Image (spheres, rainbow, N blue to C red):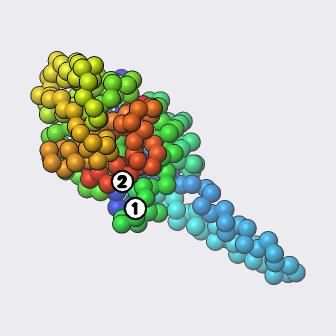
Amino acid sequence: MTAMLMALVDGSAYSESVCRHAAWIAKRTGAQVKLYHVLDPRRAQGRRDLSGSIRLGARSRLMEQLSDLDEQHAKLSQAQGRAILEDARALIEGEGVADVITRLRQDDIVNTVEQKEAAAEMIVIGKRGEAAGLESPHLGSNFERIVRASQKPVFVSNRSFAPTDRVLIAYDGGVSSMKAVDYVARDPMFAGLKVIVATAGQETADMRRALENARATLNAGGHEAEAKILKGAPDKALADLVETDGIDLLVMGAYGHSRIRTLVIGSTTTEMIRSCKVPVVLMR
């Protein structure tokens, strides 16, 4: 059975990066790309409540007009959604990926992920959506909801696509980070890439041993891998390493209780993903 990537596009500036990263992953893995554009019905709800305080004959006339506007808006939203999907498909096919299909859904985006991700190997999303300004200090409003809901790895694309050669795995010895090491070692998406596996904090014999075991797993998977123990707070130490070592992709666990894994969901992690200029793969 052909592997499938689930890519979410909304027409924002990040959608092109989502498409290019999805194409890059698909070409390396042979996966099908399934593009989703989700129309949230709650967005139009406010317009239907505007006449609540109106009385007399004006109310019925206004209700008719609002109903007509709702219908027109729904048609325009669907037309826009189809156009976004067709542009996204053309972009991915232009990158040399033939197996691309599109889906337009009217639903909450998290419901869509929960209902459709079972067949997917990975979900590809952008850091920000159409409602977030490019200079906004915040991630897209749906970002954390999707990461919390998903049971699959989530690839979070940055603003613009760039070739990937060097991968950093944020490692702490926990289940998520060990899963990340195994995933990078085995998945064809990472084939031939150079990998650094790193942790931050006080060096101990146990941590050094764990890092060396992780490095050995990566080497056995065909990677040129090295292990590092960084000084300082994990968020700053890892972010600095991304900058100084020319890292192209960060892989880290999405949940857990250690210092590194709590970066991902919570203020410190959100800050790291926001400030990090490279894509991030989040592992459950």
Give coordinates of residue 8: x percent, y percent: 42, 48
Where does label 2 land, which residue?
Answer: 274
Which quarter of the image is occupied by the C terminus?
A: top left
Q: Is residue 149 visible?
A: yes
Q: Residues within 10 Å of mark 2 (few under 14, many from 20)?
A: some
Q: Amino acid at mark 2?
A: Arg
In this view, the residue farthest toward the left is 224
Mark 2 → mark 1, Cα distance in angstroms: 7 Å
- The answer to whether 193 appears left or right of 41 in the picture is left
Which residue is painted at 52% across and 65% down in the image? Answer: 76
Camera-side residue: 52 or 30?
A: 52
Q: Could one spot residue 16 in this view of the protein?
A: no
Residue occupying the point 59% across, 68% down: 72
Q: Earlier in the sequence, mark 2 or mark 1?
A: 1
Q: Nearer the viewer, residue 167 or 200?
A: 200
Most foreground residue, 172 or 217: 172
User: Residue 225 is drawn in which quadrant?
Assistant: top left
Left or right: 14, with 211 as reference point: right
Question: Residue 195 is drawn in which quadrant?
Answer: top left
Secondary element at image label 2? helix
Total marks in image: 2
Q: Which residue is mark 1?
A: 137
Residue type of the residue flagged with mark 1: Pro
- Choose top left, top right, bottom left or bottom right for residue 282: top left
